[in-house]
Each structure stands twice: as structure tokens, then as C-alpha cells.
Amino acid sequence: MMSRTMIAVLLASSVFGSAGAAYAQDVTLNIESWRNDDLPIWQEKLIPAFEAKHPGIKLTFNPSAPTEYDAALGAKLDANTAGDIITCRPFDKSLALFQKGQLASLNDLPGIDKFSSVAKSAWITDDGKDIFCVPVASVIHGFIYNKDAFDELGLSVPQTEDEFFAVLDKIKENGTYIPMAMGTKDLWEAATMGYQNIGPNYWKGEEGRLALIAGKEKLTDPQWVDPYKTLARWKDYLGDGFEAQTYPDSQNLFTLGRAAIYPAGSWEISGFNTQAQFKMGAFPPPVKNAGDTCYISDHTDLGIGMNAKTAHPEEAKKFLEWVASPEFAEIYANALPGFFSLSSTPVKMEDPLAQEFVSWRDKCKSTIRSTYQILSRGTPNLENETWIESANVINGTDTPEAAAEKLQKGLDSWYKPAN
Amino acid sequence: MTTKTAKTRPVRWHIAVFLAPAVLIYTAVMILPLFGTLQLSLFRVENNASAFVGLDNFHTLFGDPRWAASFWNALKNNVWFFIIHMLVQNPIGILLAALLSHPKLRFSTFYRTAIFIPTILSFVIVGFAWKLILSPLWGIAPDMLNMIGLKSLFAPWLGQERYALTALSLISVWQFIGIPMMLIYAALLSIPDEIIEAAECDGITGAAQFWKIKLPLILPSIGIISILTFVGNFNAFDLIYTTQGALAGPNYSTDILGTFMFRTFFGFQLQVGDRNMGAAIASVMFFIILAGVCLYLFGIQRRLRRYQF
């Protein structure tokens, strides 16, 4: 009943929405997206840039609310009323659309071969044969710190884990600042900003992630348990009552200047730039010993693909070709500092904090969050369980070993590695 | 004469006509979905097609150690949620009603309104307001405890496994205390003055009057309130969802049947929704509530003595 009314509403809106377009001679491509925050960027920068070079093709950016996007898109695709261009969620959500024949294969799209395999991993079939979305943006994890506070306390940016904890100790001793702004109430902070942030250094990025998928490593192996052991030590450096501290609380603590270090994702950059009144810097997750190879979580977050049933496949492909080009990457990355282009061609960015984040790509190896590809298909869901267990470990209600064991057991209950 | 009596009873169409709107609407929005849910719980999606699997989903729910653990955890939490309501909400509601119905109490309409207001607030507002009140960072709870020198008693309750569920139950009690209060208040008002006067003539006044005269007379109302609380608690979902999220953290300690069903049915984050398992949980919830209501109807309500005035 719900979905039927929804389809009716969507049908009505798309009929009325496209009524205006019928008068124009040009082909109009509708873009579906959940990034309603990006509407001004598309209207003011991206669309004019594309239309100037491609006369005869008009673009309309039609975003919906992030929480409604998946359901609305699914209903529209089923009813054949979806836009020509689809913004792709990473991994299984888009893969399912491709398998249903609703996203077109982009194997022969010019420019698609310029993306790295990590970048493409989010929008590729398990066997790696078909790619169905152009990788657009990723988010990088690390730590953002209050530069003024660091100067005031005479601290330098930590490179190794020991230095990291030494810095935290000093901040704690001084007492002016909360050493680290993070809470466990919303659970995902603990997993995403904690475990997935520092983890890649332990499990060696892609190497460990792929071994886990292949079943050659287990979550109970030391390289997967050690990040939990480190997380357990964070407890002492978080603010009072961190167990009930939510994600917005953490953001506010940091931007109000009450905390010195913020375990971050790069998507925070634009928000923090407008909110924080102090200078900020960033450092990548510290390595165990000085000189170790560093690994960063450079998580693929957004791609753009083509509706397989579009009426204008030629024009849509032209648009996607442009999306895969460095020109698009540069406009996009600069308009949204913190959402980094996945293009292999280096992109020039103006924001210093964003530059800092993206510079790690040169010295560190990139990986994506370990739980996102394949491993979160079953029940219990590894990603969701990781949220719970990461919070438990930081709260001290589970030991790192117990947490790892629970996760592995949950995974074993449905996941059988290919070999 | 005989033919005449047969003709005096025409078909009473008006009954059907007047019942029709309610019956139709209720069937469309309640009964059909209910049977739809029960039916959905007997199927499973295999290879993109729905297949009849009998009671297999229920077998998974109770037989698979992980599903069973989640289910029993949710049920246990739900029972605790209910117990707190029965022990705190209803006695306090009765007490408030007794105080409010006291003829000498001034401003009683003001109190009545003030206490009832949370009940008409949206869950989202209640959840958000209490999250802020109890926030260790910006909340007023730590400051207020500090003022009376009890800061050491404060803990980030909503984030601790041991206290989160109790804290949430009490928030829910705070929100819904107006309902037992109003129902009992109405019942107390409907007690005829003659009975009270007769009691006073016999020398029963004050607290004794409440226990011996009023309480037995409002017992049916208390029964109704208990069953409403039971149904409401086992269907609860909103408050937990708005304050703790769909994962009902920390470590599922606030997971009740409603959130468990929601998470399973609609999925969450990377978890894809499983409509059939979700429907199975919803069916179990339905049967639990059905059993509880039947127990009340046949076991308790029939034995309640009613007084006709």
C-alpha cells in the first residue's frame, strides 16, 4: 500500500516535472542523487560547466533526502520513471541494481580505465568483470587536531603510536582540553572513526582486507585484534560521560575548542572550516614504528552510473565520460573539500586541510573499510556488529579478544570464503 | 396474529449501515495488514522468488542460536520495560489521581493539565529533550545534581549497558503517566457521593477510605490500565528508536521487540531488510500480546466484581 502511493506520487511528480522539458529542443538528462546538500554546487558550477561544452544536452539535478533515496530510487526504477543518471551508493546496493538490469554496464566508457582498482572496487561485480558506475568521490580517515592547542601545549604531530599516546597523556595532564573528542553512544563513531580509521595500519590495508574476504585471515588474528587493543586504551582520553556522547556532541566539543584531537573523516572538513574559530591541522593514523609503511582508509563513497532503461543512452554516456574526466574531478573536489576525487590524475585543491588529507595518498597505501565489500551481505551483518563491538571495547564491556571472537563467529555463521 | 409478529421485525439495515464505515476502515488498515503479516511470515525469498516455507522462519527465529539470542534478549528487555511501567507508572498514576480527586486540593486542573502534557508530545520531542537533559556534556541533570551536592551520583545513563533500559523505561513512564492518572481520576469521580457518605457514617475516612472503599471500586479501571500498558509496552518502539537508534545500543541492551522487528524488517545501514523474518517477529509479537490479553480477559476480568450503582 505504502509503495503504491509512493509510486503514484513519484509518477505524478515526474510527469509534472518533465512537462516543462518537453518544450525544449534539447535532450534533458535527469540526475538522481541523495546529496541534496550538493544542489547549489551542481546548479552553479557543474551543470554550467558541462552544458557550455556540450550544447544540446541539458542537465537537471534531482536530489532526494539521503534516508529516502534508496527506497525512492528503487520504486522509480521499478516503475520506469527514474532519471537517466543515477548516483550510486557503494557496494551491494548498486550491485543489486546492476544485477536487476537497472544500471548499465560501463566497461567501454572512455576514461573508466584511468581509475585504480581500489576506486573501482565499490562498483564492480564480484568477479571484477563488469563496472557499472564511474567512481566519483571518496572520504579519507585520519585525525584533525586543534593547532592552537598543540602550539599552546608545545606538542608536535605524532608519527608513531607511542608518540600519539604521549601527546594524549600530555594533553590530559595539562587539563585545559579534553584529549580526544569521540563518543560511543551512536556506535558508528567508534567503528568508523575508531576501528576503521586506525585499523588499516595493522592489517596492512588491502592485503589484509582481501585476505579476510578470501578466508585466509580471521578477525581473531592479531592484526585484526590489535586495533581493538589500541581502541581500548582510548577510553582514558575521551571526555567525561563519553558513553552517552553522540556524534554531534563530539563535533561540537571539537569545534568549540574544548577538545584537542578529533578522530575524523574528511567529510567533516567543510563543516569544521565554517564552525571552528581556531587553526586546524590533520595527521594520518599513526604507525606502530617510525618508518613503517602507512595505510589509510580512503573509502569509496559515491559513484555515478546510467539508468539502463534511459531514453538517451548516447547523451548519458557523454555525460559520464565527462564525469570521468579530470575537469569534473577538479570542480567537484574543490567545491566539496573532503570528498576527494577518485581519479588517478592529480587534482589541485585549495583548502589546506583537504590538501593535507589528500597528500597522504602519495605516502600511504589506500584501502577501503574492511567490512563493506561482500562481508556485510548476510545476517548478522559484519558492519553493524563492528559498530556494536567497537563501542563495547571502548566502553570496556568487552575485551578486544572477546569482541573479535564474537565478530568472527557471526561472520562464520553465514560467510563461506570462495575457496 | 402470528403473521403480524413475523412482519414486525423488518431487516434492520441501519445497523449494518452505521457499522460499515468503522468495519471497512478497520478491516482495511488493521485486519488485512495483520493477516498479510501472518502470511508473509510463512514465506521466504529464494532466488528472487517468494516460496512457501511453512513455519521455517519461526524455526530459524527460535532454533538458530543467534536469532534466538537476539529474540530472547529483546523479549527479556521488553518484560523489564513492562515491569518498570507496572511498578512505577501505574501506582504513581493512581496516587496522582487520588491526590487530584481530593476535594480540598487547589489548582487541581492546572496539575492535571501539566501532568498530562507529556503524553500528547511527540516521541521525537520527548526523546530529544531527555537526551539533552541527561547529556553529560550540556545536560542540566549533572548541573542540578551538582547543586544539591550529589554530582557523584550522575552517570551517562543512556550510554551504559546496566542503566540504559531502566532510564528509558522511566522516561517512558514520565511521558505516559497521564493516561493511568486520567482513567483512574475519571473512575474516582464516578464513585457516587452516597457511598462515600455512608463510609464516613461508618467511620471510614482518609487513607482507610481509599483502601477499603475507593480502591475496590476502581479495580476494573486498574485492570484496563494494566492491559493498555501491556499492549503499549510490547508494541513500543519509537522512544528507543529516537534516543538509541535502530541498533538499540549499547550492545543491544535496550533492544525491545519493536526495535528488533524494525531492524530485521527494514534493515539498517549495510544490513538489508528481511521482510519475511521481520514478519515472523511481528507475528510472534502479535501472539504474545494476544496471549496476554486473553489471559487478562478470561483469567482476570471475569473474576473482577463489578458494582452497580
Image (cartoon, coloured by chain):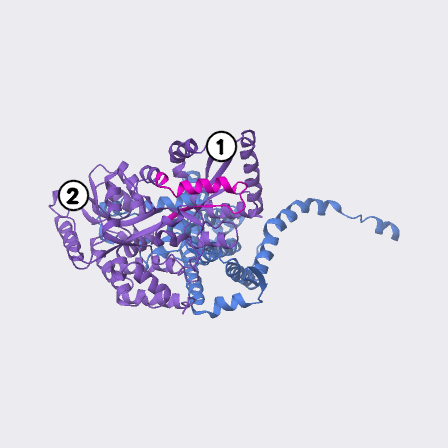
In the image, residue A20 above or below residue A390: above
Q: Which residue position is annotated with label 1?
A: A56
Q: Amino acid at mark 2?
A: Ala
- Indicate which disc, 2 or 1, sits on the residue closer to the N terminus: 1
Q: Look at the image and give the colour of chain A.
A: purple
Q: Position of residue B174 (x, y in %)?
A: 39, 48
Per the image, label 2 sits on a secondary structure element best described as: helix
| Residue that appears at 27% across and 61% down | A203
Q: Nearer the viewer, residue A219 or A364?
A: A364
User: Magenta part of the protein: which range?
Assistant: A301-328
Q: Chain of mark 1?
A: A
Point out which mark residue A157 bears: none
In the image, residue A399 above or below residue A315: below
In the image, residue A195 above or below residue A10: below
| Residue that appears at 43% across and 62% down | A379
Tag nearer the camera, 2 or 1: 1
- Residue B188 in view in this figure: no
Q: Look at the image and give the colour of chain B.
A: blue
Q: Is residue B61 magenta?
A: no
In the image, residue A91 above or below residue B112: below
Q: Amino acid at mark 1?
A: Gly
Q: Chain of mark 2?
A: A
Per the image, label 1 sits on a secondary structure element best described as: loop
Q: Nearer the viewer, residue B38 or A190?
A: A190
Q: Which residue position is annotated with label 2?
A: A149
Q: Position of residue A348 (x, y in %)?
A: 28, 39
Figure disc tally: 2
